[in-house]
Image: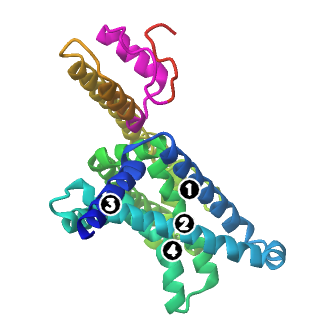
Amino acid sequence: MDDNTNTDSVSLRHRTHQIFEIEHHGLARFINSVLMLLIAITVIIVFVETMPQVRSEYTSWFIWFEYFSIALFSIEYIARLWSAAEIDPEQPWRSRWRYAKSPLALIDLLAVAPFYLGLFIQLDTRYLRVVRLLRIFKLTRYSHSLSMLFQVLKNELPGIISALSILIILIVFASAGIYLVEREAQPEVFGSIPQAIWWATITLTTVGYGDVVPITFAGKVLGIVITIMGIGIAALPAGIIASGFTTEMQNRRDEFRAKLMASLSDGKLTHDELRDIERLRISLGLSLKESKALIRLAGTGHITHCPHCGKDISLHP
């Protein structure tokens, strides 16, 4: 009896892991869709709750929805943590701890932690309402575009930090420079370097609100130089991220192509191989059009339909 119970538990754990971490169709797709809808509604409610009239009229509805969403998010987190043992069944608790420290797991925890903290610690309700916006980061688990953005930011972090460091250095020098030439003419806005930081920042980032402007000749010349420098410097992080997106997409295409060629190495494709290829396509965020092109490059006509949804992914559009 105990052996059967243990076997059933392991089987259920394996199935749970498949649904939450591996599969992208059927029940897994339905669960992901429900969770994404809950996140979207939560964000809308956070915005709506800041309107006093609406909040007072629908308070009870908002409270019950919060309980409902917290219950589902909590079940999701517990299920993912419990089934994470399948990563390495020989060391289940180490696998769970490793998963618990992962970025996505921490995001899931932050999505529910404020609610439970509020049960034991007196917290400002306005703070709790805004903190609930953290749940929007859960979309990175279900949105391939957002997950790719975070991956690009992670890959390009050294370059982004370098660009931001240059920008900070220029802000410091610009603040000191405008302080030297404008402090006597406008002591109320350029009377110190900390005061001048606001003007230097919005000028270097080419925002230029116009609420603080230099009036001396030297100040205007410095403003022109800083603005011209800002056009290039402020664009650096955007260029780095754009380049990172291109590189990441190419890496994902290469990974898909490598998997496809490995599957074709024996001259045939089994149903399991087809299913693995489709899973990889979805996890990499590649469209059917892209996968068709890569399949065409691989030179095979064996793949005609998705093994799950039945959609045509043949070589010919």
SS for dot 1? helix
Q: In terms of sequence position, does the residue under pointer 3 or pointer 2 come before the other?
A: 3
Q: Which residue is mark 3?
A: 8
Along the viewing direction, whichever of 148 and 28 lies nearer the viewer = 28
Q: In terms of sequence position, does the residue under pointer 3 or pointer 1 come before the other?
A: 3
Residue mark closest to the camera, 3 vs 2: 3
Q: Which residue is mark 4?
A: 191
Q: What's the distance in space between the residues labelled 4 and 1, CA to CA?
A: 52 Å
Marks 1/2 in contact by CB < 8 Å: the verdict is yes
- For the N terminus, give its image quadrant: bottom left
Q: Amino acid at mark 2?
A: Leu
Placement of 57 over or under 284, stated as above or below: below
Q: Which mark is residue 72?
A: 2
How crowded is the residue under tag 1: few (<14 C-alpha within 10 Å), some, or many (20+)? some
How crowded is the residue under tag 3: few (<14 C-alpha within 10 Å), some, or many (20+)? few
Residue 274 x, y percent position in the rendering:
34, 25
Q: What's the distance in space between the residues labelled 3 and 2, CA to CA?
A: 24 Å
Residue mark closest to the camera, 2 vs 4: 2
Magenta span of residues = 282-308
At a point 21% along the width and 64% down the height, the residue shown is 92
- Asked if residue 81 lies left or right of residue 235, the reply is left
How many numbered discs sit on the rendered protein? 4
| Residue 40 in view (yes/no) | yes
Residue mark closest to the camera, 4 vs 1: 1
Q: Which residue is mark 1?
A: 35
Residue mark closest to the camera, 3 vs 1: 3
Q: What's the distance in space between the residues labelled 1 and 2, CA to CA?
A: 8 Å
Q: In terms of sequence position, does the residue under pointer 1 or pointer 2 come before the other?
A: 1
Q: Amino acid at mark 3?
A: Asp
Magenta span includes 263: no
